[in-house]
Image (spheres, rainbow, N blue to C red):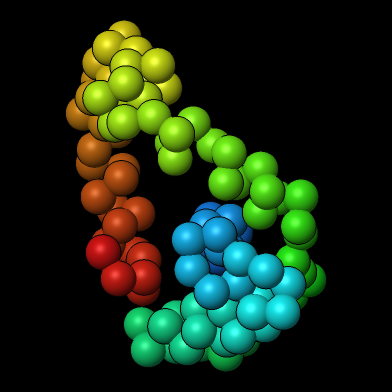
Amino acid sequence: MINKLQGWVVATGAAVVLSWSSLAIGADEADFPAYVDKIKAEARAAGYTEDTLNRAFAGVKFYKKSVEADKNQPEFKLTLDTYLPRAVPEWKADKAVEMYAKHRELLDKITGLSTAPH
């Protein structure tokens, strides 16, 4: 169960990091392999195993349409002060604080089981 969770976390993290490819090398198809290698090197340095990296990056490829969409995200077009109230209304932030407090013990246990840096 924990290995499955760790794999999911790494894969999700890889997807998020790779979705930011327009912010670094990798914003075009020719640079993408070097960008992936850089991310893998950072993950290795953080202690991720080769097996975990192979599973997390299996099938990762450059999607031009995703990079174009990424460049047009509101996060890049709006200031933080105008974006946050739209993206996270006060009721949502209040609910997040409430749920965090309610499940803090479990979340702390999960964090303790993780081998990922935190």
Q: Is residue 55 left or right of residue 52?
A: right
**Which residue is pictured at 25% across the width and 25% down the height?**
81
Q: Quadrant of residue 102?
A: top left
Using the image as rendered, state which of residue 50 and residue 65 is in the foreground.
Answer: 65
For the residue pair 63 and 106, the one nearer the viewer reads as 63
Q: Nearer the viewer, residue 73 or 55?
A: 73
Residue at (61%, 66%) from the top-left corner?
Answer: 27
Left or right: 54 as drawn, with respect to 89: right
Q: Percent x, y for residue 15? A: 60, 59
| Above or below, 98 relative to 117 | above
Which residue does the image show at 23% across and 41% down from the upper left?
105
Locate the N terminus by quadrant: bottom right
What is the x, y in percent for residue 88? 36, 21
Label total for image: 0
Above-or-below relation of 56 to 41: above
For the point 64% across and 79% down, which residue is it?
A: 31
The answer to whether residue 90 is seen in the rendering is yes
- The reply to whether residue 52 is visible in this rendering is no
Image position, residue 92 (x, y; %): 35, 16
Rendered view: 92 above or below 67: above
> Residue 115's spot in the image, x, y percent?
36, 73
Residue placed most toward the observer, 105 or 39: 39
Q: Quadrant of the C terminus?
A: bottom left
